[in-house]
Amino acid sequence: MSVRMKIQGLLIDPVSQMPIVILKNSSEDRVLPIWVGVFEANAIAMQLEKILSPRPMTHDLLCSTIEQLGGSIERIVITDLRDATFYAILHLDLKGKKFEVDARPSDAMALALRCDAPIFVEESVLEKSSKPGDADSMEPDRLRRWLETVDPEELGQYEM
């Protein structure tokens, strides 16, 4: 089963200094932090802030290409968490034909923002990321403890 989530914020991990995308479900009782690269974080931040690039960025180009071919991104799903790495799938519809395309979650989220597609996370991923002491959840567990003390305004007001 998948849980629909939204991008709640984009912040910098105070320890590793790496960008983190914070996903929350609509009732805000489930949180999923995903560490992303600097360039991917920039692509997500630009869209969240509604900053237009003078020329299409890679995610803009891909979204435009899919649309020009008569297709759409129906949704993106974060499907797995293995060895501290998240996995995602783009669910595409091209003139009624369905496709599933493997993607990095950061790219999938950047595309979801540009193509107005919903973001889902498999329940198993949420469970794996919340298990204390699990090697796959060491970073998310540390971040959750930090998020308990952070001012919510520091996360921004991003929603998709």
Image: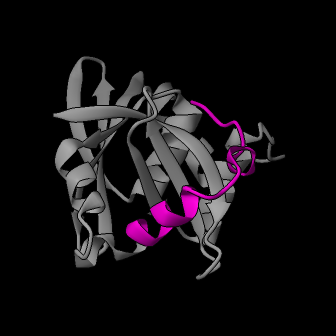
Q: Quadrant of the C terminus?
A: top right
Indicate the position of residue 143 as horizontal and vertical percent values: 49, 66
Point out the image quarter for the N terminus: top left
Q: Residue at x 77, y 41 (%)?
A: 49
Residue 159 higher or lower than 95, as above or below: below
In this rendering, would 153 be left or right of 70? right
Of the pair 134 and 105, the residue shown nearer to us: 134
Looking at the image, which is closer to me, 1 or 104?
Answer: 1
**Do we see residue 43 in this rendering?**
yes
Instruction: Please tell me which residue lies in front, 83 or 144.
Output: 144
Residue 16 percent coordinates (x, y): 58, 82
The residue sitting at 47% across, 54% down in the picture is: 107
Where is residue 55 shown, x and y percent of the image? 77, 48
- What scheme was used to colour the molecule? one colour
158 part of magenta stretch: yes
Outermost front residue: 149
Above or below, 98 relative to 80: above
Residue drawn 21% across and 53% down?
127
**Label tally:** 0
Residue lying furthest right in this view?
54
Residue 56 visible? The answer is: no
Residue 121: x and y, percent? 30, 42
Q: Is residue 154 magenta?
A: yes
Q: Which residue does the image show at 66% across and 57% down from the upper left?
A: 150
Q: Residue furthest bottom?
A: 16
121, 111: nearer the viewer = 121
- Write down the quadrant of residue 149 in the picture: bottom right
The residue stretch that appears in magenta:
140-160
**In the image, 97: left or right of 141?**
left
